[in-house]
Amino acid sequence: MSDYKGFIRKFNLPDGFEAPVSLEFQDLIAKPLNRKDVQLDMEAVNSSLEIIRKTRGGSWPAEAVTEEFNFLDLAWHEREFRDGDSFAYAVRDTSGKYIGCFYLYPMGLRTELTEELLEHDVDASWWVTAEGYEQSYYQKLFSALQQWLKDFPFSNVYYSNQEIPNED
């Protein structure tokens, strides 16, 4: 058995692939996460620390985020999206209310790569605000994500959230 710890499996995207800049599902709309989202994203994260940790798992967010930290984080997501290294989307409802985010990372970036995970070509994770969770947007965003991933050239998705909703 090989040790893949520390390895990141880059995306194998077709030449000319451009990630969607708008995705819709029922009353959800996803657009690439960028620096313009800094205030809404910061407020959403900081008001939802416990629910994000409970559902998404992982080490982020370790604490409330500052505006400066969040600006740099969103600029990083924006650059990765532009370069096709990963894809992060802000999700709102049709009224414009910030619901949460979802991320498509290469395997090994968020979740430690193991031999069992080599068959997967993307690590998908998401979070919603505490209010969104109470309103069942966590399940709805999971359903939306399953639909939206059909617009990407991935064949075997690994959903890395700690809490995976039952599929209806």
Image (cartoon, rainbow, N blue to C red):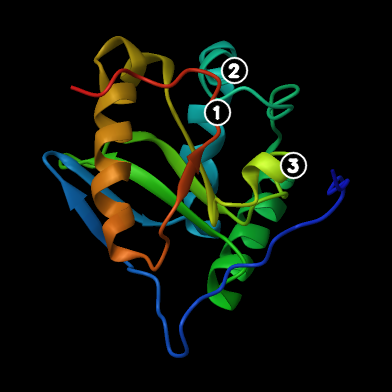
- Quick one: SS at disc 2? helix
| Distance (Cα) linking label 2 and label 3 | 28 Å
Question: Tag 1: Cα neighbours inside 10 Å, few (<14), some, or many (≥20)?
Answer: many
48 relative to 16 in the view: left or right: right
Image location (x, y in percent) of residue 137: 28, 24
* Image: 110 above or below 166: below
Q: Which residue in the structure is indicated by mark 2?
A: 49
| Distance (Cα) linking label 3 and label 1 | 30 Å
Q: Which residue in the structure is indicated by mark 3?
A: 114
Q: Which residue in the structure is indicated by mark 1?
A: 45
Residue at x 71%, y 35% (from the top left corner) = 66
Eye-nearest disc, 3 or 1: 3
Q: Amino acid at mark 3?
A: Thr
Question: Tag 2: Cα neighbours inside 10 Å, few (<14), some, or many (≥20)?
Answer: some
Q: Amino acid at mark 1?
A: Val
Residue at x 36%, y 65% (from the top left corner) = 152
Q: Residue furthest left?
A: 26
* CB under 8 Å between discs 1 and 2: yes
* Image: 84 above or below 105: below
